[in-house]
Image (cartoon, rainbow, N blue to C red):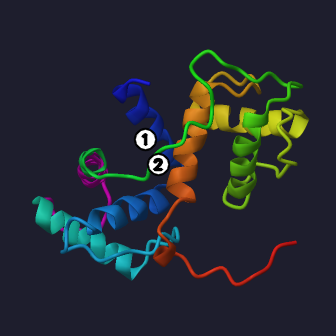
């Protein structure tokens, strides 16, 4: 995927839940910039988020308003993208096959189990995603989840899992699920 398209897709995801995206970017930036407080990514524009935004604005030479206008958003996003390019991340696993591979509605592929599991986790964060059995079969519920994501991403709504849809799903999962363990309360529940 080319860098411009990758950034465009990422921007669409971020706009769909701007406060969580803002908090996620500021949290990542706080690892490099000590003047930023470490935020919890909770989707609430509270006092700590306001403090982080104002600190960023002050250091970036922007008007210190605490309001995230276009200039502030773009400055934070650009700073985060630059840091993201310099920061080492965990080794990426190749989950979905190469460009051109598609899993049509009704088809079964083992590698579809991971995207289905990711949708199941995201179902707790987004209306419109329905939990389904992660069995590798692109059945009606799985295909509806894929169409939901395609619609949200501005992709053709085929219900078919393809590389562009996989890329959007993995970005969405990274932004809204993958966070450091110290960013979330410890899981104390059980399974089932």
| Mark 2 touches mark 1? (CB < 8 Å) | yes
Give how far across and how far down residue 50 sits, in percent.
Answer: 33, 74
Residue 89 colored magenta?
A: no
Residue 48 seen by the camera: yes
**Residue 37 location (% of width, % of height):** 29, 77
Residue 103 drawn at (x, y percent)? 76, 24
Label 1's element?
helix
Q: At x 83% / y 47%, what residue is drawn?
A: 134
Instruction: Rate crowding at label 2 as few (under 14), some (14 to 19) or many (20 or more) other CA atoms within 10 Å.
Output: many
| Image vertical order of residue 188 relative to residue 80, above or below | below
Measuring from the top left, give residue 127's x and y in whole percent.
73, 53
Residue annotated with mark 2: 14
- Report helix, strand or loop for mark 2: helix
Query: Badge 1: few (under 14), some or many (20 or more) residues near its Cα, within 10 Å?
Result: some
Q: Which secondary structure dominates the residues rendered in magenta? A: helix
Q: Which residue sits at x=41%, y=65%?
A: 23
Q: Is residue 164 left or right of residue 110?
A: left
Q: Of residues 92 and 77, which is closer to you in this image?
A: 92
Instruction: Kindly report the distance in space between the C-alpha atoms of the residues bearing marks 2 and 1.
Output: 5 Å
Q: Foreground residue, 58 or 34?
A: 34
Residue at x 37%, y 73% (from the top left corner): 49
Q: Which residues are magenta?
A: 62-81
Which quadrant would residue 58 be assigned to in this image?
Answer: bottom left
- Tag 1 residue: 11
Q: Residue at x 59, y 26 (%)?
A: 163
């Amino acid at each position: 995927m080319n860098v411009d398209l990758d950034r465009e897709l990422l921007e669409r995801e971020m706009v769909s839940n701007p406060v969580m995206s803002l908090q996620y970017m500021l949290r990542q930036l706080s690892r490099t910039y000590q003047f930023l407080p470490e935020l919890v990514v909770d989707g609430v524009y509270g006092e700590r988020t306001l403090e982080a935004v104002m600190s960023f604005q002050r250091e970036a030479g922007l008007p210190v308003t605490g309001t995230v206008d276009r200039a502030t958003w773009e400055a934070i996003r650009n700073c985060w993208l630059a840091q993201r390019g310099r920061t080492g991340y965990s080794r990426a696993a190749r989950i979905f096959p190469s460009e051109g591979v598609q899993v049509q509605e009704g088809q079964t592929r083992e590698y579809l189990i991971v995207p289905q599991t990711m949708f199941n986790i995201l179902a707790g964060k987004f209306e419109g995603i329905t939990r389904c059995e992660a069995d590798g079969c692109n059945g009606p519920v799985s295909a509806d989840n894929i169409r939901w994501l395609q619609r949200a991403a501005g992709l053709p709504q085929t219900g078919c899992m393809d590389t562009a849809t996989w890329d959007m799903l993995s970005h969405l999962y990274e932004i809204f699920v993958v966070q450091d363990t110290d960013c979330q309360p410890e899981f104390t529940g059980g399974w089932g």
